[in-house]
Amino acid sequence: MNVTGPIKVIIAANATANALLSGRVYPGVIDNGRGFPAVAVTRASTEANATKTGVSNVDFVRVQLDIFARTYGEAEDVSEAVRTALDFYSGSVVSGADTVNVDHIDYLGTIDNFENSPELHRVIAEYIMHIKR
């Protein structure tokens, strides 16, 4: 399941997050040549919602967003804007040829970090996406 596409669409629909990122949301690894701030989206795991009656129709997808910026303040601003866009989002998201039905997204927390080469501030944010299949 491609979660980067839907996350990119949700972020782009939020004026503040979109203004800060200008579309720089990438699957797995950031494109260094495109500038900062930027976000790399990684699916950490997928779990089915256990049911007693049959096949699950909801998956829990744990997603890690690595937010990179030149300053700590900019990284925090992007982190907050992305959280505003994603936390408890609900709806159908069209990404390319796919439509993903998001029951809701839960914010789990963040960790601050720093990358030495190149010198970038990094915020690692985790979310759980409840996806209807």
Image (tube, helix red, strand yellow):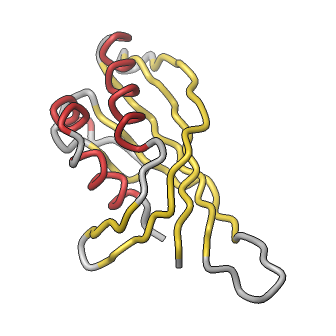
- Vertical order, 83 against 96 (above or below): above
Give me the residue at 61% from left, 37% from top: 108
- Vertical order, 71 against 95 (above or below): above
Q: Position of residue 9 (x, y in %)?
A: 27, 55
Q: Which residue is outermost to the right? A: 52
Q: Which residue is outermost to the bottom? A: 54
Question: Residue 10 versus residue 90: which sits nearer the camera?
Answer: 90
Question: Residue 65 versus residue 48: which sits nearer the camera?
Answer: 48
Q: Position of residue 51 (x, y in %)?
A: 78, 78
Q: In the picture, residue 76 is in which quadrant?
A: top left
Q: Position of residue 109 (x, y in %)?
A: 59, 31
- Vertical order, 72 against 11 (above or below): above
Q: Position of residue 57 (x, y in %)?
A: 62, 79
- Vertical order, 28 against 18 (above or below): below
Q: In the picture, residue 70 is in which quadrant?
A: top left
Give me the residue at 27% from left, 70% from top: 94
